[in-house]
Image (tube, rainbow, N blue to C red):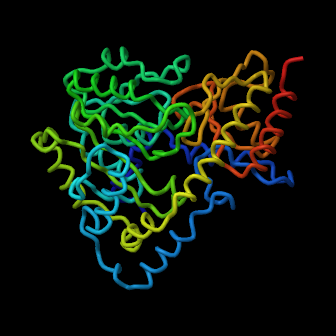
Amino acid sequence: MEGKAWNFRANKAIDGSKLGIRTYIDILRSNIDHSDGRSVIPLSHGDPSPFPSFRTDPSAVDAVSEALRSANFNSYSSTTGLPLARKAIAEYISHDLSYKISPDDVYLTAGCAQAIEILISVLAFPGANILLPRPGYPIYDCRASFAGLEVRYFDLLPEKDWEVDLDAVESLADDKTVALVVINPGNPCGTVWSRQHLQKIAETARKLGTLVIADEVYERFAFGRNPFVSMAEYAEIVPMIKLGAISKLWFVPGWRLGWMVTLDPLHIIKDSGLLGSLENFLNMTTDPVTFIQGAIPDIIGNTKEDFFSSKLNLVRECAEICYEEIKKIPCLNCPSKPQGSMFAMVKLNLSLLEDIGDDMDFCCKLAKEESVFILPGRAVGMENWVRITFAVELESLIEGFARLNDFAQRHTKK
């Protein structure tokens, strides 16, 4: 029966957006040889929570259980988050700063990913552009593309421990540049920038008149020569919005509790109208789960420092093993030893390999032949590189590199 043509169709803005990390992992999963009796070793994404060594602290589980059983958190939340949760997070962030954060500056989100979605949506206006790091975290690219916000990439420099190419930042920016995104500790590079470099970034952004988005979801994941210093220390220089979450430090990404913190001592964000737009957008979006919000004061207050220090020591040991094992494989080169987060960026020397076309081919064949997942570098903006996640069970990490070494030897040109 013929009739009027259907009015709905594919959304080209979505279909044309950059692929997210989960899409690449699905591609790798589709290459698995199911006749291989070995378990898959996931060195491709930053979620160590399934591994016994990275289980969250029992006090955090108790806090969630008690909040749920109390029946005090079954109602809707306010759009900015429950006051007791905002207060607890403000105090938590303030602990490592030289000044105090106000709870009124904290906005709760369903994970750090939703915070990114909200910010990109609010910042997007016709003709605007945003400066993103390359390599970087692809959700920024995906959301910007969908929102119609032009992306301009500045390089992180592997020969300088992945510092920001500040000259490139200045050359890329114009009067329509709305924000500069910095991720520290670094995903995907495993960097922790020095206090001096952070100040230079802030001064450059001030010179350009652009907001800084400080993605610090891996804060405190610093185990190298540089201690973690929050960009929040430079809010007097440039207005910024700090992003964070409990997902990484407590190893609970599925709990979906993140935050945005406006750092605006000179009221630049407020006077621009951006703060009002941010709050209006929050009225149109979903809230984080209320019983997780309700548990936050006890999650933060009852988790002992021993939990964090023991997990950081484990991540440090994994990072050391990762770096040393990479050096044993001739076709791989890690230009900068990981200093933080859960990742290392590794350059492929394809000239040493046969039957490997590029980073995607390398990762798909590795998945098929060895049941090991690593992320192709194109997922984070760097073709013919790979990103390796080292925050996994030690035994799995060692076995994963043994298989990776076997794969590399098998494909080495004779």
Q: Position of residue 342 (x, y in %)?
A: 58, 42
Question: At x 82% / y 33%, what residue is drawn?
Answer: 405
Image height check: is 35 above or below 68?
Answer: above
Question: At x 30% / y 56%, what residue is drawn?
Answer: 90
**Foreground of the two, 225 or 232:** 225
Q: Position of residue 287 (x, y in %)?
A: 32, 65
Q: Quadrant of the C terminus?
A: top right
| Res. 411 image quadrant | top right
Question: At x 35% / y 78%, what residue is drawn?
Answer: 73
Q: Quadrant of the N terminus?
A: bottom left
Q: Is residue 181 left or right of residue 344?
A: left
**Foreground of the two, 82 or 142:** 82
Image height check: is 256 above or below 36?
Answer: below
Question: At x 79% / y 54%, what residue is drawn?
Answer: 39
Q: Is residue 108 left or right of residue 224?
A: left
Q: Is residue 51 left or right of residue 402?
A: left
Figure label count: 0
Q: Position of residue 183 (x, y in %)?
A: 43, 36
| Res. 412 image quadrant | top right
| Res. 231 image quadrant | top left
Q: Residue furthest left?
A: 271
Q: Position of residue 179 (x, y in %)?
A: 28, 33
